[in-house]
Image (cartoon, rainbow, N blue to C red):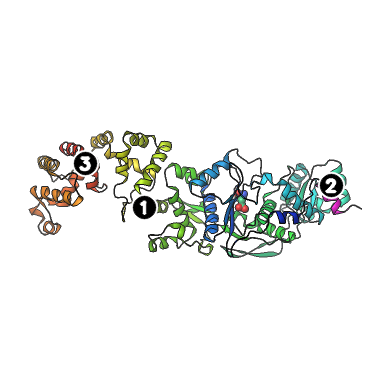
Amino acid sequence: MATNEDLANLLFPEVTETIADLEKRFPERNLPEGAQVTRFAPSPTGFLHTGSLFTAFIARTVAKQSGGVYFFRLEDTDTKRTIAGSADDLIHQLSQFGIVADEGYFPDGDKGVYGPYQQSKRASIYKVVIKELVRQGKAYPDFMTADELAALRKFQEDNKILPGYYGPYARDRRLTVDEAIEKIKAGTPWVIRYRSMGDHDKKIKFTDRIRGTIEIADNDVDIVILKGDGLPTYHFAHVVDDHFMRTTIVTRGEEWIPSTPIHLQLFRDLGWKAPKYAHLPVIMKLDHGNKRKLSKRKDPEAAVSYLLKIGYPPKAILVYLMSIANSNFEEWTFQNKSYDYTQFPFSFKKMSLDGALFDESKLNFFAKEVLAGIPTSVLAPEVMDWAKENDAVLSSKINQDPAYFTKILGIERDRPNPRKDYAKYSDIEPATRFFYDEDFAKIKANPLPFNPKYEPSFLKAFFADAAEKMAYGTTESTWWDSVKSIAAAHGFAIANKDYKANPSAYQGSVSDAAELIRIALTGAKDSPNLHEVIEILGKDHVQQRLRSAI
Ligand code: GLU
């Protein structure tokens, strides 16, 4: 009578290594106490989803904050779903966020000694482990054809039986070794299944770093661990890879919670210590009052590339994601204004459980804060690069005169309380149109009216004087003094309280006078700091706009 050992040798004659050899090849990492090893393990099946960026960001944050290692593993065993080039795109996009792995798969080759970091290149490693499981009778070949499996599914469906290959429905689980060997020798195609000893009627418990104790029905399905194409399924690859890559915390989406019993069984049967798990909330969106998953189809913001294309600075997106991750982050930013978000002590315990909500106004709030804090010298080249790729109109304006554009960008920047007017780079062009004559002509074609209490002749005289007598090329206070004296000469009150005490004695207050100048120069009632606007436009332009204001 043949043994499991014979079966294992027949299935995997080429495998000579043992699990002990692998343990030596991929030894425990030598890291300080508390240092965590985390990973981001995407499948190369499309674009970088905002939820995946969130997952990668959290994984990296946990590793960085604990002095550990963050690595990137490419989960490309589902060859049918693989999209060529998408792995490298993912890595490139993550690098735009500074999320670069300490080790792992890189487009120009692996970095690190726990590789290969691409699952399709690890077949020989998985087979060592599978051969051992077969030898121990914990895994077996299954010869069911696609048609037979479909018939089983239909039978279960028709009879309202829980679907799957388990217990009485796990046909080939009961084959003797001799029967299996005979089929293999006859050339019958096979996959390898795990022989689950779990009982679906019993619950198992495990601790999730975010959710605490999770109690969930145990697995009794004999899942496929090695497919017909010689590659493992996710479940098996996860267990082998996170063991031999010495991951300490698995951060992955909450959709994996129901499969965790499978993973824990495999870890236990292999005699390995399971990593800790942190199942991250899915990013949700409020849609007409109902929460739903951020959807690739319906929500452009589900694609990171879209957020970058409309010009959110990567840092702004990360700061925003941190606010989704930890409810105490926002308060922390107020208390630690001089700190960078990377100094925030992230904690799994502070993670929201009922789905993180993607909220555009919140993103804009954080993005404005972040964008305002970027020095002009850093921001200008970033915006120029962005515009080249994404905004032809802005790009051509920049090219007309880059120094002029840089000055515009620098308004009320590089100071303790910078102006928070842009959330994203695409906000810049519309907000700065008045600086460009062609656009200003369009603004003037449909002008904001001046307060009708002022007669045109009054305005004409006031603007003529302002054009002539305003101080140019000076400090803000010298310029303001000049505005005050021009205003006073035209009947405006210099002190607000004088105006308030006796409004009918004046044309208005000095701020009303400044507003007239502002409208004449920018076409709007609110603009950035008027003195800076005047200095950037330059005396000639200012005079010309004031003289033709009415
Ligand atoms: N490849 C899996 C996914 O994209 C990874 C899950 C995990 O991190 O373990 O969902």
**Looking at the image, do the residues carrying marks 3 and 2 touch, with CB atoms under 8 Å apart?**
no
The circle drawn on residue 373 is 1
Residue that carries the numbered disc 2 in the rendered image = 10
**Looking at the image, do the residues carrying marks 1 and 2 touch, with CB atoms under 8 Å apart?**
no
Choose top left, top right, bottom left or bottom right for residue 229. top right
Is the residue indicated by label 2 positioned so its CB lies within 8 Å of ligand 1? no
What is the spatial separation of the Cα atoms under label 3 and label 2, in whole angstroms? 86 Å
Instruction: Tell me the crowding category of disc 2: few under 14, some 14 to 19, or many 20 or more residues within 10 angstroms, Cα based.
Output: some
Task: Let me know if residue 64 appears in the view.
Answer: yes
Marks 3 and 1: which is nearer the front? Answer: 1
Residue that carries the numbered disc 3 in the rendered image = 521
| Tag 1: amino acid | Gly
- Image quarter of the C terminus: top left
Choose top left, top right, bottom left or bottom right for residue 221. bottom right
Q: Is residue 34 left or right of residue 16?
A: left
- Say whether disc 3 or disc 2 marks the residue closer to the N-terminus: 2
What is the spatial separation of the Cα atoms under label 3 and label 1, in whole angstroms? 27 Å
| Tag 2: amino acid | Leu
**Looking at the image, do the residues carrying marks 3 and 1 touch, with CB atoms under 8 Å apart?**
no
Q: Secondary structure at mark 1?
A: loop
Marks 3 and 2: which is nearer the front? Answer: 2
Residue 368 rendering spot, x and y as whole percentages = 37, 51
- Does the magenta portion include 7? yes
What is the spatial separation of the Cα atoms under label 1 and label 2, in whole angstroms? 65 Å
Residue range corresponding to the magenta coloring: 1-14
- Say whether disc 1 or disc 2 marks the residue closer to the N-terminus: 2
| Residue at 56%, 50% in the rendered image | 101
Which one is nearer the viewer's eye here, 546 or 471? 471
Q: Is residue 165 left or right of residue 375?
A: right
- Does the magenta portion include 420? no
| Tag 3: amino acid | Leu
